[in-house]
Image (spheres, rainbow, N blue to C red):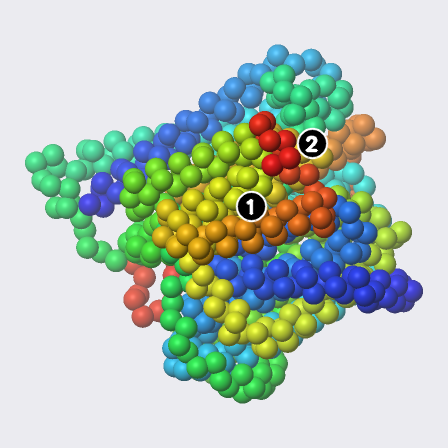
Amino acid sequence: MKAQSVRGLAKPDLILSCAIFIICGGALALSFTYSSSMSLLLPRVAAGLGMLCAAWMVVGATVARRRLDEETPVALPATAVHEPTSTVEDVSDTDQDDPNDAEYILSNTPKRVWITTIGFICGFFLVLYLCGLFIAAAALSLVYLVVVGQKSWLFSVIYTVILTGLLWGLMRGLTYIPSPPGVLFPGG
Amino acid sequence: MIEAIGSGLSQVLQWETLGLMVGGMLIGFIVGILPGLGGAVTLALLLPFTFAMEPVQGLVFLLSMWIVTTTAGDITSVLFGIPGEATSAAAVLDGYPLTKKGQGGRALGIVLTSSALGIVFGAIVLGIFITVIRPVVLMLGAPEFFMLVLLGLTFVVTLAGKSPTKGLAMVALGLLVSFVGSDPSAGLPRFTFDQMYLWGGIPLIPIVVGLFGGAEVLQLMLSRSSIANGPLDAKLAGTTRGVADALRNWPVVLRSSSIGVAIGMLPGLGGTVAQWISYGQARQSSKNSEQFGKGAVDGLVAAGATNNAKDAGSLIPTIAFGIPGGAATAVLLGGLLILGVNPGQEMLTTQLDITFSMVWTVVIAGILGVVLALALVRPLATLTRISGPVLTPILFMFLVIGAYTTNNNNSWGDLFVMIGAAVLGTVCLRWDWPRVPFLLAVVLGQLLEQYLNLSNTMFGLDWLTRPGVIIVGAGVVVTLFFSIRAVRRDHKARLTPAPSNVLSTQDVHSVGDKK
């Protein structure tokens, strides 16, 4: 169990480290294409530092994974190698079991909820692009309350009207702060 | 000096400014009581609303909101055992047990009164220090400021949490983000990929909004529950007794406030560290240390006093050097610049009255905030029971407005930056990568390059031999040494089994770590 969890932790770190290495490496390579009159010392130092740290992480994560592969007997189930000692790693594992913990929420949310949530976010930004802030706000509020919040239509409509009205009043009447216009409805 | 103090007070006491202060305080209450929504995020979201304001009005609005956020964070910690703010986590340890014993009112009285005392102490130190630090700042030039910014960056080793390598990688990433745009010496576009939007650099506010707010709103959408799930049936009586308890423990208040201010002053450290150091010293010096974690009054006093005093402390480097003490002061620094107030020499000379108006705001908003909190405890507590889906549309609007309107471009680019930062924030939260080093690097990167270029242009390489540079350089080395030593010690402690009945450092970190 522990071996699996460590292995599971090492993989995302490996991927993220590789991503940082590529970004920093790209930045370093790009910096050599610029004119020498430009200020490039610090960008190169930052890119170098990033590459160094990422490489260190990649090596560390790879070694950890390989060591685990060597230590875990193939014939035994993963649970058999779990040592029931009370280490601090175990403490942090129990932290992960706190349902209010961000890591717990992000890792234990069912796929269906993830897809619905991402769908709502994408839908909101699509409506925002097409119709502008106020229509997008009203649409998100109404649909989200009915579908996800399981609220009644009456409550959702009243809530939406108040929210959109307050938003309109705040942006158009009080502060005159510009809001994202829609392609189809620039005033929306 | 006296003139500036008086002028600062009279500017704060204008009706319009006081109205904005009350508005900021009410927002601060709501934000502070909602766990996860920190002062930094709200400062970022409210920044666009200050565009049309006078500098003092804008600063009063932002500061009063931020100060009250810290106070209100303690309410959620005490009532539900969930820290309203990352810096309110220590209040959970003794506040929540008192609430469970039916002494919620007393616990709130203790924590709110010690908060008020801490903020007054912090403001006095801020006012005095600002006047003392003035000649020091006037002696400093671009090379010394470069070294000070570097000193701020070295604290990311401490902020990186369990893995300093991850922290440094995030710093590198943050620095690269800050270097996007026209370069300071030739004015040519750098890392812009032929995008006009990027010529002016990547704006800070959409990054902050996405990095913190985006990730928190996503969590709320995924959990679909109310923010607080704890019981609200505790008796909220005994508040007066709590006030008396806090006053009786004045030595603890003094010690904890001093620790809060001192650590708050160090850029990069902030309140998350200060609260645990203060809590630890209160426990060491307490006659009933066995009560700590079970409802010790002095433990709660220490947590409350440190929490607000550190805010005043973190304003000192922000005002005097333009170096933010943490995420919230980083955003506040952005607010200062937007309002046309330049931290550093100007705020200690020509704009000293504005500086003192900030000191007065800290005092007035801090005390009024505590009085309001004591009066509004029960209705405020019910906010944490609002269902997540009901809250989500409002928070979503805050995210979009906060990101879109903070930059003069008013472009979709800002929204894309916010979305990108939200993705980064979520990835960091999910796989335990630190977010604060990235943000500090984004904030400090431009300053670092600006001061380095100025130093080289003005002094060539001779700036390296200036006494101020050598002194701060030694500070950088010492800080690095102690940070690395602390990280190594923490790593060793993690590898050794912790006794179950003792509050270990790791327990403390696990409660207090805010990624």
Q: Residues within 10 Å of mark 2 (few under 14, many from 20)?
A: few
Q: Is residue A183 left or right of residue B103?
A: right
Q: Residue A167 appears at what percent x and percent y? A: 61, 48
Check disc 1 and report its element: helix, strand or loop: helix
Residue B263 visible in the picture = yes
Residue B190 drawn at (x, y percent):
65, 21
Would you identify the image quadrant in which residue B156 lies? top right
Check if mark 1 and mark 2 are on a common chain: yes
Identity of the amino acid at label 2?
A: Asn
Of discs 1 and 2, which sits in the foreground?
1
Up the image or down, A131 lies above or below A36; here it is below
Q: CA distance from mark 1 to mark 2?
A: 19 Å
Q: Are marks 1 and 2 in contact (CB under 8 Å)?
A: no
Name the image quarter holding residue B126.
bottom right
Chain letter for mark 1? B
> Residue sitting at 75 percent across and 21 percent down?
B187
Q: Residues within 10 Å of mark 1 (few under 14, many from 20)?
A: many
- Residue placed under numbered mark 1 in the picture: B397
Q: In the visual, does B267 lie left or right of A63?
A: right
Does residue B176 lie above or below B85 as drawn?
above
Q: Which residue is mark 2?
A: B409
**Residue at point 58% right, 39% down?**
A133
Say what secondary structure mark 2 lies in. loop
Q: Given the image, on which type of amino acid does mark 1 rest?
A: Met
Which quadrant would the N terminus of chain A be assigned to in this image?
A: top left
